[in-house]
C-alpha cells in the first residue's frame, strides 16, 4: 500500500503518461567507459530532447565527479536518465534523483522518488545507474541531479549537477 501511495504522489508532482512508443535506456547499446551511451547523440530523431549535467562533489565529498544524461521524446512521454559517479568509496550505495530547480535552489523529486535504483560503487570507485520516469519534462523548466550520502543520511546531498538542455 505504501508503494501505491508514492505512485499517487508521483502522479501529482508532474504530468505523467503511459506512452510506451518512445526511446529509453535500453535503446542505447554501446556504453562508454564513463557509463554514458556512446551513441546518445547519434541518429536520434529530431523530436528527442537531451539534457546533460556535470556532477560535482560537495564539501567532504569534493573528490566526486560524474555525468548525467536525460532523454525524452518531445510529445509528453516518460523520460530516461543515466547517472555515473567517479572517485567514490568502494561499496558505497548512493541514492540519486532528478529534481526540479537547480543545485542552488533545490526542488522536489521529479516523479516517483522510489524509482531510481541506487548507485552502487565498484572497486574502481565508479557507479552507474539508469531509470525510466513516467513524467514529462518541460524544456522551459530547470532540473538537476543530486546524489545523497545514503538512505540513512538522505538529507545530506554529497554531489549535484544542473541539467542543461542540449
Image (cartoon, grey):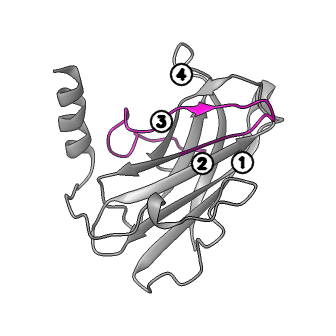
Query: Which element is circle 3 on?
Result: loop
Query: Picture coordinates of residue 46 (x, y %)?
Result: 44, 86
Frontmost residue, 104 versus 126 = 126
Query: Picture coordinates of residue 114 (x, y %)?
Result: 37, 32
Query: Which element is circle 1 on?
Result: strand
Is 51 drawn above or below residue 111 in the view shown? below
Q: Residue at x 62, y 63 (%)?
A: 37
Q: Which residue is mark 1?
A: 66
Q: Residue at x 77, y 31 (%)?
A: 88
Question: Of marks 3 and 1, which one's residue comes earlier in the chain?
Answer: 1
Q: Which residue is mark 4?
A: 155
Number of the label disc, if any, that sits on residue 156: none
Q: Which residue is mark 3?
A: 117
Q: Quadrant location of residue 136?
A: bottom left
Q: Are marks 1 and 2 in contact (CB under 8 Å)?
A: yes
Of all residues, the one furthest to the top in this rendering is 152
Residue 121 sits inside the magenta stretch: yes
Q: Which residue is mark 2?
A: 83
Instruction: Examine the rendering and report whether any part of residue 86 can be seen.
Output: yes
Query: Picture coordinates of residue 15 (x, y %)?
Result: 23, 56
Amino acid at each position: 500500500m505504501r508503494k501505491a501511495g508514492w505512485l499517487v504522489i508521483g502522479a501529482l508532482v508532474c504530468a505523467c503518461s503511459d506512452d510506451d512508443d518512445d526511446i529509453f535506456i535500453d535503446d542505447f547499446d554501446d556504453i562508454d567507459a564513463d557509463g554514458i551511451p556512446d551513441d546518445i547523440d547519434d541518429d536520434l530523431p529530431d523530436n528527442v530532447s537531451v539534457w546533460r549535467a556535470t556532477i560535482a562533489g560537495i564539501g567532504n565529498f569534493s573528490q566526486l565527479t560524474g555525468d548525467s544524461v536525460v532523454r525524452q521524446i518531445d510529445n509528453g512521454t516518460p523520460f530516461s536518465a543515466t547517472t555515473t559517479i567517479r572517485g567514490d568509496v568502494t561499496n558505497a550505495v548512493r541514492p540519486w534523483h532528478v529534481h526540479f530547480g537547480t543545485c542552488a535552489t533545490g526542488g522536489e523529486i521529479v516523479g516517483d522518488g522510489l524509482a531510481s535504483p541506487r548507485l552502487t560503487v565498484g572497486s574502481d570507485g565508479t557507479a552507474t545507474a539508469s531509470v525510466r520516469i513516467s513524467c514529462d519534462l518541460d524544456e522551459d523548466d530547470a532540473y538537476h541531479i543530486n546524489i545523497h550520502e545514503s538512505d540513512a543520511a538522505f538529507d545530506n546531498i554529497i554531489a549535484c549537477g544542473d541539467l542543461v538542455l542540449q
